[in-house]
Image (spheres, rainbow, N blue to C red):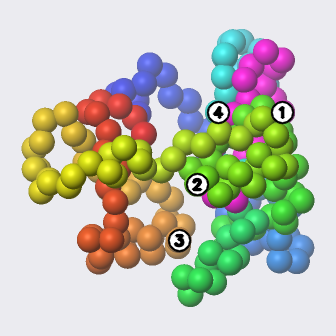
Amino acid sequence: MRRDWPEVLVFHANAGVGGVPAQGRHHGLDEWWDPALGAFLDNLFSRRRFDGFVVHNLWLSRALLHAPPGTARVLEMHDLFHKRDAVFAALGLRADFFLPTEGAELEGLARAGLVSAIQSSERDWIHRRLPGRALLLPYADAALLRRPRRPPGYLEPGVVRFGVLASAHSLNHDASTMRASKPQSSRARRSPAGSAE
């Protein structure tokens, strides 16, 4: 990132991030929030102007409350966290990571002016509850998936192939392991060289 972006600011998470729920089965919406991050953002926004502020993942949605008026607030989601119990169970995995209630998730999503989803079913769920705020940014480009497949060339011009860059979360690990063991069932995401996805 430091090579490709003009500026990268790093804020190290506190030890509370990633912990089990403090009470019951579900996390509170801001249970993993670090007030020091809020102070960091307040300081940054007092010195710099940003047209847009994109936050990845619900458990950081409180950060959107620190953006000043006039800044577009976007929450980028890979899935709906309150539905993860069923996803984990279907995969035979123990549910872990951030598990809010449906109501807490909706409260976090409402902090954003725009919420991006990668699955149409989840975009639709968000749209029914927050009309006009849901945007679909699909995981794979449907046009690419309809193209005739040809054997991939390792050094194909204009195409970058990459693997998984993710946290050590069990679902990420298991998903990458499943894809590695069953490459015929996975779909590669392709992008022009040099673009970030």
Q: Which mark is residue 65?
A: 1
Give the vertical position of 6 relative to 115 (above or below). Answer: above
Residue that mark 4 sits on: 54
Label 4–label 2 contact, CB within 8 A:
no
Label 4 to label 1, Cα distance in Å? 12 Å
Q: Nearer the viewer, residue 187 or 54?
A: 187
Q: Which residues are magenta?
A: 59-80
Amino acid residing under circle 1: Leu
Label 4–label 1 contact, CB within 8 A:
no
Q: Nearer the viewer's eye, disc 3 or disc 2? A: 2
Q: Please report whichever mark, 4 or 3, sits nearer to the chain's N-terminal start.
A: 4
Q: Nearer the viewer, residue 121 or 24?
A: 121
How crowded pointer 4 is (Cα within 10 Å; few <14, some 14-19, many 20+) is rated as: some
Amino acid residing under circle 3: Leu
Q: Please report whichever mark, 4 or 1, sits nearer to the chain's N-terminal start.
A: 4
Q: Quadrant of residue 130?
A: top right
Q: Nearer the viewer, residue 118 or 52?
A: 118
Amino acid residing under circle 4: Val
Location of residue 14 in the rendering, given as x and y in whole percent from the top left corner: 69, 52
- As drawn, is 129 to the left or to the right of 181? right
Is residue 16 shown to the viewer in this render?
yes
Asked whether residue 109 is drawn in magenta, I would say no
Q: Secondary structure at mark 1?
A: helix
